[in-house]
Image (cartoon, grey):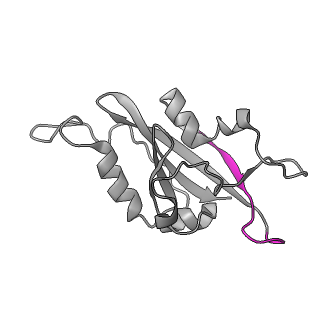
Amino acid sequence: MAHVELSLSEVFVPSGGTPTEQEYDNIERWSATVSSADEPCLLIDSQTLVLAVSATGCELLRLGVPEDVIGLPLLDGRLRLLDFTAYRGELAVPEIDKIPPLLALTSGRLARGLLRIEAAEEGSPDATVDAISTPVLVNGNVAGSLTFFSEV
């Protein structure tokens, strides 16, 4: 799978005759895009509720199927994040706040980092994914974050 990085800073810049951000809900637009995407991606709102996730995103993050996680908090127990030590301990709360989807929400900026996802089955290898997140703005305020993932 190829890794593509996108700059989302000018994606929805209004030009003559196009609706402004206030006239068209960025969250709805991104939700439809993420839901139908072939790439592993995730959209959460400012309360960390999953608004949309691609099928490949669910597979990579070991979340089941999109219908199982839409509307639930991202960290409701389905997403099992591990630290990068040999011990493979569960990620501590201060570190969870620094994962790209959450950091993009709190900082209002692009965030990137590696995540270690616990294996779905005993004896299977854990997944390491590269995550890049951008805040999604509505009326100039951070309303969510959009994250693209790539397996490392």
On the image, the x and y values in percent for residue 34 come to 40, 58
Q: Is residue 45 left or right of residue 139?
A: right
36 lies above or below 76: below
Give me the residue at 54% from left, 48% from top: 73
Q: Is residue 100 left or right of residue 66?
A: right
Give me the residue at 76% from left, 62% from top: 126
Write the start and end of the magenta stretch as one range.
112-124
Residue 13 visible in the displayed image? yes
**Residue 104 within the segment the image draws in magenta:** no
Give me the residue at 69% from left, 50% from top: 115
Q: Quadrant of the C terminus?
A: bottom right
On the image, the x and y values in percent for residue 44 come to 47, 46
Q: Quadrant of the N terminus?
A: bottom right
**Residue 123 within the segment the image draws in magenta:** yes
Give me the residue at 52% from left, 35% from top: 104
Q: Nearer the viewer, residue 121 or 134?
A: 121
